[in-house]
Image (tube, rainbow, N blue to C red):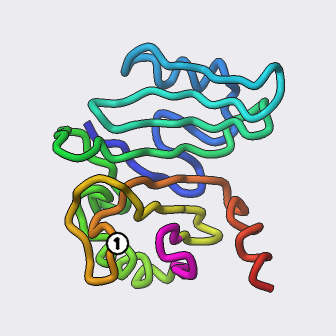
Amino acid sequence: MDLVLNPPYGVAPVQLGMTLDEAVAAVSPWGEPKVRTRRNRAPVTISTSCDGVGVQVLLETGALVTAVELWWPGEGKQTSTRVLLDGDDVFRTPAEEIFRRAAERGWNVDQTEIEYPFIPGVSLGFTRQTSQEVPRTSDGLPVLITSVLVGGEHYYNDRLKTRD
């Protein structure tokens, strides 16, 4: 199976702006999703997995899907599911190659926080952090991305503001 990142709109079958019920229905074919709420307050999180790839659907305002985050299966685990960004397998392609290709597309990859790079406007966020034993760069970062988040167009605006 392929999970195709479609920033800033979602990861099919989950689209940003879906209701809780729509999002639960979208991920239910993969298994029973867990819905976590905080006593009728935001955020609401739907957690599941697709063939070992962790999936978190975020409803940060409580009403509609605001982001979708996917997590690599983990050390020693295998999956046939690919997480694709313009044909690149995000969890099997070295992070630096993913970022180079993003720059070639005209996207500005902000690596100010090297463990949490992001692409504003497109709204992709990445994690390059894990406590697991994985191949690492000379800087100590995992060679591969450990999670990717697709948010709305302005999802990372707050991170940009903190540097102004």
Q: According to the image, label 1 marks what residue?
A: 141
The image quadrant of residue 48 is top left
Q: Which residues are magenta?
A: 108-117
Residue 112 vertical placement versus 23 (above, below): below
Q: Give me the residue at 41% from left, 64% from top.
A: 128
Q: Give me the residue at 19% from left, 40% from top.
A: 77
Residue 74: percent from left, percent from top: 28, 44
Residue 69: percent from left, percent from top: 51, 45
**29 vs 41, nearest the viewer:** 41
Q: Main secondary structure of the magenta part?
A: loop
Residue 24: percent from left, percent from top: 56, 20
Q: Give me the residue at 29% from left, 64% from top.
A: 144
Viewed as shown, does residue 151 lie left or right of 64? left
Viewed as shown, does residue 87 lie left or right of 48? left
Q: Amino acid at mark 1?
A: Leu
Residue 89 vertical placement versus 67 (above, below): below
Q: Give me the residue at 71% from left, 23% from top.
A: 37
Residue 84 vertical placement versus 48 (above, below): below
Residue 110 covered by magenta stretch? yes
Residue 113 covered by magenta stretch? yes
Q: How many marks?
A: 1
**129 vs 28, nearest the viewer:** 129
Residue 136: percent from left, percent from top: 25, 71
